[in-house]
Image (cartoon, rainbow, N blue to C red):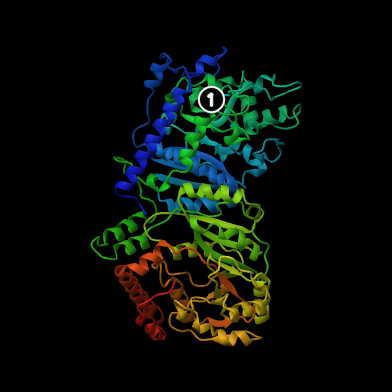
Amino acid sequence: MLPRGRPRALGAAVLLLGLLLLVGLFLLAGDPRADAAGGSCCRPTPPEPPDGRPSGPAAREGAPRPPRCQLLHVAIVCAGLNSSREVVTLVKSMLFYRKNPLHLHLVTDAVARSILETLFRTWMVPALGVSFYDADQPKPQISWIPNKHYSGLYGLMKLVLPGILPPGLAQVIVLDTDVTFASDIAELWALFAYFSDKQVIGLVENQSDWYLGNLWKNHRPWPALGRGFNTGVILLWLDRLRRAGWEQMWQLTARRELLTHPATSLADQDIFNAVIKEHPGLVQPLPCVWNVQLSDHTLAELCYLEAADLKVIHWNSPKKLRVKNKHAEFFRNLYLTFLGYDGNLLRRELFGCPSQPPTGAEQLQQSLAQLDEEDACFEFRQQQLTVHRVHITFLPHKPPPPRPHDVTLVAQLSMDRLQMLEALCRHWPGPMSLALYLTDAEAQQFLHFVEASPVLSARQDVAYHVVYREGPLYPVNQLRNVALAQALTPYVFLSDIDFLPAYSLYDYLRASIEQLGLGSLRKAALVVPAFETLRYRLSFPRSKAELLALLDAGALSTFRYHEWPRGHAATDYASWREAQAPYRVQWAADYEPYVVVPRDCPRYDPRFVGFGWNKVAHIMELDAQEYELLVLPEAFTIHLPHTPSLDISRFRSSPAYRACLQALKEEFHQDLSRRYGAAALKYLTALQRPRSPV
């Protein structure tokens, strides 16, 4: 949802204060000039303007800026899951400082495209366009080049950008995903004005002695002009490059150098430098502060004189944030500031720059404008309309191999339920799709939580999808729909995070689906009977017989038996005790079992937020679409105790909360009646109960 009101402005002010504190700490750390033992390679002197104007600070201050509302183009090569996370932090830093409309040109593989398309569609940032280009298409043009760099084939992709990007695009800024902005990108774009008629590439000098060939014995780098140039930040004058025959130029140079070098060591950077060595007139050197390189053996300290000089920080060491540098802590804190920064705050308009609104933004604003802020249920109505940022496949994930009867466990959770994940992974060996409701900062805590857990880090078949927090109510059904949409198997087990399934349930469900002949000819929802314990320590039953013994001993009970028996009574637990085969049950008012259904089942109704009726409405929809309800005789899942959620506490204590839930029920039934006609009349009884299940 597009932001409004004081909280977002306050958040921006807090970040600004934090950045000012970082600058103060940097200044206290001392002047880096005191340690500079000669060498002028990295001083922040701007390039000599082509018209002969003086260089130095005066030239930098007087550098022309692009018109206020000029569209600036940025190209980024992004492949894989980790790179997709990196590019988000880069984009946050750009958006924080920018004053111009931006258009991102993202060259991606299929994985990154799926992730980033969803992210930018749901982020809804004004004055930000995004175009995607298939990274597989130009691979044959570069796959013949041996490359030892950790970036692999994608590290060579910038060489072919002039052929990938639209022919009408004249200029573009090209960035690595591991850079962080500390200034307005328009200032970088303004350096195009310093290009002579012959210059086509703008680069910052390499801030190490790599290309001098003296780092170790027998070190033979590719040829370069002096210390060479770093390609983490590039200004490309595309139309000039195309006219100059860039493709033939770099290919001839690369083939010649590969006769004496077995491979590139620094991917595209080696080839760019070899071309520039042969054609030095092509390059316009850029001020070093636009690419402060934190690599091993870096000389970056010779570049910046004070924190205000810093423009772009480049984490171009494989060690990334762990790199050792005199001012590494300052740089690290700047990066972490953006890593945890609330991306919702970047949904701000560019004042004075009319632009095409993001897709769906106008309709959303119209719907929000129609809400009555005096309505007692305004909070519910607003939460229903909220468009949450969604980052699917947040962590590395290996899709399961195709199996005709496979089942994915689908659930949602917030930060206070992370402790359930390890136990769930031990109980369910199959694929899972989990939606997590987190802030940007919590998402990073979650990442570290998984990396530190031997159990979780070993599971590559669990897909985690982050839905970023916004609004006062928990969007439970929106979260379920995100997780459900990302399931990749033919069937899904719709569960909740505070339930542990039987150890054998995964294999049993797959066998049952096959034996019952489910599929296009038989539409059924398989009911998994739910139980609960009030004990924090339980010897988990490994069979139905053990479960019945615990049930008879009082260590277990049927789920919500004491609080809400209507929610699961239709499962008919008495029949389940004796059942040897699946049996059919009828829908009943307020029935909310945990079920296994085909992946293309109806989605959850997103109007139900917070606590109440969110699963009941879904089961009604399944029944309206004539799904059979079949109870499995050997299946079970057990709810573990936990502290009550904020929403259930509000439901129990607030008559207004319960009244709003009742209003949502009535609206849902009206919609159900419109879709299913007379068949929906039987659901009227569901509206006659004042209390409500989960």
Quick check: 23 above or below 161?
above
Which quarter of the image is occupied by the C terminus? bottom left
Q: Position of residue 678 (x, y in %)?
A: 39, 86
Q: Position of residue 668 (x, y in %)?
A: 37, 74
Q: Position of residue 383 (x, y in %)?
A: 36, 61
Quick check: 677 above or below 276?
below
- Side of 497 where 387 appears, left or right: left
Residue 324 vs residue 139, the one in the foreground: 324
Which quarter of the image is occupied by the N terminus? bottom left
Mark 1 crowd level (few <14, some 14–19, many ≥20, 10 Å Cα): many
Q: Position of residue 12 (x, y in %)?
A: 36, 41
- Farthest residue to the left: give it: 374
Residue 596 vs residue 449, the one in the foreground: 449
Q: How many marks?
A: 1
Residue 453 vs residue 196, the one in the foreground: 453
Residue, disc 1 = 204
**Judging from the image, what secondary structure is the residue with disc 1 in?**
strand
- Side of 591 where 406 appears, left or right: right
User: Measuring 41% from the left and 31% from the top, which residue is drawn there?
Assistant: 21
Q: Can residue 1 be seen at all in this image of the molecule?
A: yes
